[in-house]
Amino acid sequence: MGRAGSPTRYGRIRPPDEAWLAKAPPEPILEPELPIIDTHHHLWERGGHRYLLHELLADLASGHNVVATVFLECHAMYRAGGPAEMRPVGETAFVAGVAAMSESGQYGPTRVAAGIVGFADLTLGDRVEPVLEALIRAGGGRFRGVRHSAAWDASEMIGNSAVANGPHLMKQADFRAGLTRLTALGLSLDAWVFHPQLDDAIDLARAFPSANIIVGHCGGPLGYGPYTGKRDEVFATWKAGITELARCPNVVMKLGGMMMRLAAYDYGTRPAPPSSAELADYWRPYIELCIERFGPTRCMFESNFPVEKMGIGYAALWNAFKRIAGRASAEEKLALFSTTARRAYRLA
């Protein structure tokens, strides 16, 4: 990864190339005092790649004022035994332990994993309730919701969510029964779909107006595989979906997370990572449209680290977000970078 002549396999996660990332010229941190809640990161040890507390802390120390983070499920540290539906509880227990370490104050001022979003199989329907209750207990007061990703495409090149069994997971009666249980417990749904599936997210949000739905990665615009060379067509379809989704008041949008899917540039063949200004130019049309349609009080930025680290460093990523939000008022910036996250994930 990161070596010239090795084209990016979009939709597949590889360990970041630290030597390649180091080739980026250092950038001064923009607006270093602006408080940030990183609403989407992972912690894992898999495939020879470790990204646990100390690796995250190294990125957090890059200069931005990250006051808290939200962990998103990534099939990390599942229980090795017991009922299959209960094994994801191990991930939440693991992250709660990391959060407790952070709250000791011995690892810096950032409240790591102040919110935890885990996994429960919502297609269990009513039978998901004891799983959700176990996740709440394991979270130690930090469990906020579930991500059961629906991202699916007919092309094998795209790389689908491991828990999506077809294009219309969100329309399944059992999934919706599970969502009913999730909502009744005051938990949120982190929804991940690709742009051709936005109609499903819209239908779900309308059918469950009391559900707190958080859509990740700007609604999943795709730019590789069968979508290669169709930027304008994809943008038009995505824009129509985002515009309609924004009319659902129970939906909040996460801004970012497009490194693997949008395929805005081939980071596998670049001699060095892009600057924050370059990344801002690549992503601005999508992020600005989301902010325009949803408004700052229903948008929040995400790092999606360490996934985005395949293509850019932490400091430059947040500089890119600050560049995109550069014309926003001080109050709007607070919403985009922290206050929307506090409300959506119910953080103290």
Image (cartoon, rainbow, N blue to C red):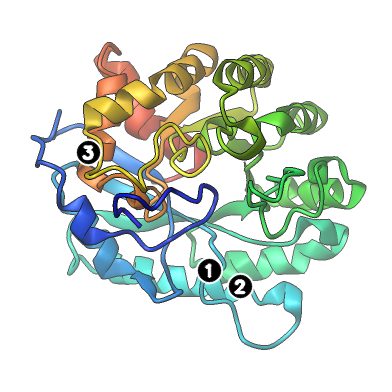
Local SS, label 1: helix
Residue under pointer 2: 89
Residue 316 x %, y %: 22, 38
As drawn, 318 above or below 4: above
The single residue placed furthest to the bottom in the displayed view is 81
Label placed on residue 316:
3
CB within 8 Å, label 1 to label 2: yes
- Disc 3 marks a residue whose amino acid type is Ala
Label 3 or label 1, whichever comes before in sequence order: 1
- Disc 1 marks a residue whose amino acid type is Thr
Q: Which mark's residue is nearer the viewer, 3 or 2?
A: 3
**Residue drawn where x is 80% and y is 53% of the image:** 178
In this rendered view, identify the residue nearer to me: 19 or 280: 19
In this rendered view, identify the residue nearer to me: 171 or 207: 171
Classify 10 Å Cα crowding around label 3: few (below 14), some (14-19), many (20 and above): many
Residue under pointer 1: 92
Local SS, label 2: helix
- Which of the image's four quarters has the N terminus? bottom left
In this rendered view, identify the residue nearer to me: 147 or 274: 274
The single residue placed furthest to the front in the displayed view is 5
Local SS, label 3: helix
CB within 8 Å, label 3 to label 2: no
Label placed on residue 283:
none
Q: Is residue 178 left or right of residue 277?
A: right
The single residue placed furthest to the right in the displayed view is 173
Label 3 to label 1, Cα distance in Å?
30 Å
